[in-house]
Amino acid sequence: MLGDIDICLEQVKRGMAWHYKDYQSEQSIEERVLYDRAETQARENRSGLWQDPAPMEPSAFRREKRRTSAG
């Protein structure tokens, strides 16, 4: 939070970040709803990373990177 602004939520709204579902249990129900709506809206508007026809989740990217660098 920066003052009254939730910076993480703003990033999700702008398509600059994913709503990382693995940690949503740490959010309040209200926050989960806000983040889910923000990501859905960003996807529908094809904002930021959602412009890519096949964006890769950060965790999948890291797994793939480890797999390819290990061999």
Image (tube, grey):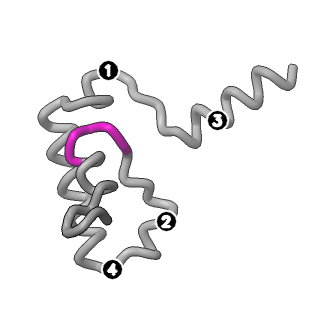
Q: In this view of the protein, which residue sits in the foreground, 26 or 43?
A: 26
Under mark 4, the amino acid is Ser
Asked if marks 2 and 3 touch (Cβ < 8 Å), the reply is: no
Give the labeled residue for mark 3.
Answer: 62
State which tag comes first along the sequence, 1 or 4. Answer: 4
Q: Is residue 39 visible?
A: no
Dot 2 falls on a residue whose secondary structure is: helix
Q: How far apart are marks 1 and 2 (CA)?
A: 25 Å
Give the labeled residue for mark 2.
Answer: 23
Give the labeled residue for mark 4.
Answer: 28
Give the residue drawn at x 75%, y 31%.
66
State which tag comes first along the sequence, 3 or 1. Answer: 1
State which tag comes first along the sequence, 1 or 2. Answer: 2
Give the residue drawn at x 77%, y 28%.
67
Dot 4 falls on a residue whose secondary structure is: loop
The region drawn magenta spans 13-17
Residue 53: image tag: 1
Instruction: Tell whether position 28 is magenta.
Output: no
